[in-house]
Amino acid sequence: MNLFTVDELTALTTASNSTCISIYAPMERLGVETKQNPIRLKNLVRQAVEKLLAMGLREQDAKELLQPIHELDTYDFWQHQSDGLAIFLSPNQFRYYCLPIAFPELTVVGDRFHIKPLLQLMSGDGTFSVLALSQNQVRLFQGTRYHLDEVELTDVPTNIAAALQYDDPQKSLQAHTASSKGNSAIFHGQGAGNEDQKNDLLRYFRQVNSGLESFFKNQQAPLILAGVDYLLPIYHEANTYAHLLPDGIPGNPETLTLEELHTQAWQIAQPYFDLAKISKISHYEELQGSEQTANTIEKVVTAAYFQRVETLFVPINKNVWGVFNPEANSIQIHAQQETGDEDLLDLAALHTLTNGGTVYAVEQEDVPEHKAIAAILRY
């Protein structure tokens, strides 16, 4: 799974682009249905060509612009899919993400990338991480309510022996494997007692925590630990990430399947997400009718653009097409998408996120007051 973070969003939306193509597609992961994946992508690329031609681009220029997408069509690419594929292409950018959301098929061409389908990964109830710990292995997973995928780690020690070898070269380590019942190896120094073993683990976990700092930079996703009981409080002591949850998954994570790990992790993450969202909705209701809330497209888009939105509730499967002119502070809304239009809901979400606000991508019926959009304002 490719990661999508606020930094990735910033890279997509701050670069100077002229013609931006955004393609979303659900992907089949198993069985003969996977043969539909390349066919689906070709159909969406064909839609992109049609939209580019409607904008006045020559057919040859359109085909040349889309060539990087055609080059993805390889056996290896199709063997490494998740539930959804998101592609972003412009004359000076090309990025794609295999993500754990089965996106509805969508092709958007405009003067910026369309990011709203990704809000499920970045919103207040988006992603969470699972750190599976043992003395023999460290693994990190990122997931949503839909799926869990392993993240390739760099700059993180693979086990306690590797960590302490470089942390303290003078310390002689021995690895004693417990009985053949599948227990992890226990590493300790010569003559070490229980306190020494705890200190070794603490040094080990501090290196793990340090190695993860770049991964968690600018993130707010909750982190869930998985490991045998005595390891979890030691990692809490070493941890500096502000969003580590107090509850963890007890037991040896190496004995769990990916599906079992996801099920247990979501049982911990879901109440956390639900509580945060309920709290924000209650706060909106307390402020309802005051100058600190807005519930029309015109007011919310303007407020988001001028960095006034603290919390945004936006329907994930709805588009409102139109044009926003920040200089004139005017909005035109169209019943159908017209040339030059953008999704105004997408625009509000983009500016809310990039200006440090929180976005909840929800079903239409879950938007406060059952409006097209709703926001809590900073002032």
Image (spheres, rainbow, N blue to C red):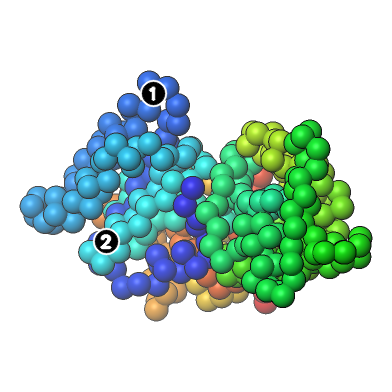
Label 1 environment density (alpha carbons within 10 Å; few <14, some 14–19, many ≥20):
few
Q: Where does residue 287 sit, x and y in percent of width and height?
A: 76, 64
301, 47: nearer the viewer: 47
Q: Earlier in the sequence, mark 1 or mark 2?
A: 1
Name the element at disc 1.
helix
**Disc marking residue 90:** 2
Q: Circle 1 is placed at which residue position?
A: 33
**Disc marking residue 47:** none
What residue sits 23% from the left and 64% below the top?
Answer: 91
Q: Amino acid at mark 1?
A: Glu
Q: Is any atom of residue 236 visible in this view?
A: no
As drawn, is 16 to the left or to the right of 293? left
Contact (Cβ within 8 Å) of mark 1 with mark 2: no
Q: Is any atom of residue 102 visible in this view?
A: yes
Residue sitting at the far top? 32
As drawn, is 196 to the left or to the right of 221? right
Name the element at disc 2.
strand
Distance between the alpha carbons at the discs numbered 1 and 2: 30 Å
As drawn, is 252 to the left or to the right of 127? right
Q: Where does residue 184 sit, x and y in percent of width and height?
A: 75, 45
164, 118: nearer the viewer: 164
